[in-house]
Amino acid sequence: MTTQTTPRARVCVLISGNGSNLQALIDACARHEIPAEIIQVISNRADAFGLQRAQKAGIPTAVLDHRTFADRAAFDAALADLISQSQPDWVVLAGFMRILTPEFVQRFIGKLINIHPSLLPRHPGLNTHARALAAEDTEHGATVHFVTPTVDAGPAIIQGVCAVQAEESAESLQARVHQLEHQIYPLALAALVAGAVRYEHGQAQWASGNPANAPRQIFA
Ligand code: GAR
């Protein structure tokens, strides 16, 4: 008699730095909270600490240094080829600090997700925590979203929301949002792998329905 196991989803994670979100995903996979296997971690920086996290977990790593390419298009084409070699079901940006060409995004659209440290559509781009404070936002947080050609504009899947406290600094806010990120990224990937949410008609469609196309939200 043969035993059959359901093949686990294949996940490729792209990083540029610390990789704490990568670690949250590694840990969630190890705890079987996501029926997925991280089959490759790619960094555009050789000194990214996340590479050590991956190696410690026994995950193959690769470095593709964008500075060795003639232009953005050439780097993105090589990156897309490298990703495709490992035939991932999902491509997960976890602190990958590169703007991607529309050609790259189109190649993986629907299975390419990102985490961003703000409640999109508020504060796309950089320095989100300081900008939330400057704008006197009462709520802040993080968003997991499908990546579309316009930077930080793809449909949101899950948001983690926290109240902005009195006497808050950008650093304290960043630390709390980071904690939220480590909760919502595994939740989002688990939902995708389970087919509970998918990219359809430019929206994040939950199987259980979300007529307003609103992201799921969790509050801290
Ligand atoms: C995270 O806060 C993530 O939201 C942000 O980079 C950090 C990476 O942290 N990503 C972006 O700003 C993308 N626009 P990590 O390396 O510890 O996971």
Image (spheres, rainbow, N blue to C red):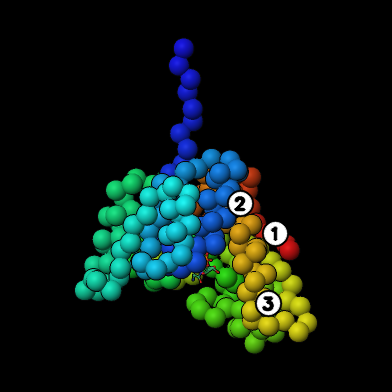
Identified at 50% across, 63% down, the residue is 19
Instruction: State the residue position of label 3.
Output: 172
Q: Position of residue 36 (x, y in %)?
A: 50, 43
- Helix, strand or loop at label 2? It is helix
User: Most extreme residue toward the right, as rendered?
Assistant: 166
Instruction: State the residue position of label 1.
Output: 218
- Helix, strand or loop at label 1? It is strand
For label 1, the crowd category at 10 Å Cα-Cα, with few meaning under 14, some 14 to 19 and many 20 or more, is some
* N-terminal label among 3 and 1: 3
Q: Are marks 1 and 2 in contact (CB under 8 Å)?
A: yes
Q: Position of residue 121 (x, y in %)?
A: 57, 72
Does residue 90 appear in this view?
Answer: no
Foreground residue, 99 or 170?
Answer: 170
Rendered view: 108 above or below 68:
above
Instruction: State the residue position of label 2.
Output: 187
Q: Amino acid at mark 1?
A: Ile
Foreground residue, 109 or 39?
Answer: 39
Does residue 179 appear in this view?
Answer: yes
Q: Nearer the viewer, mark 2 or mark 3?
A: 3
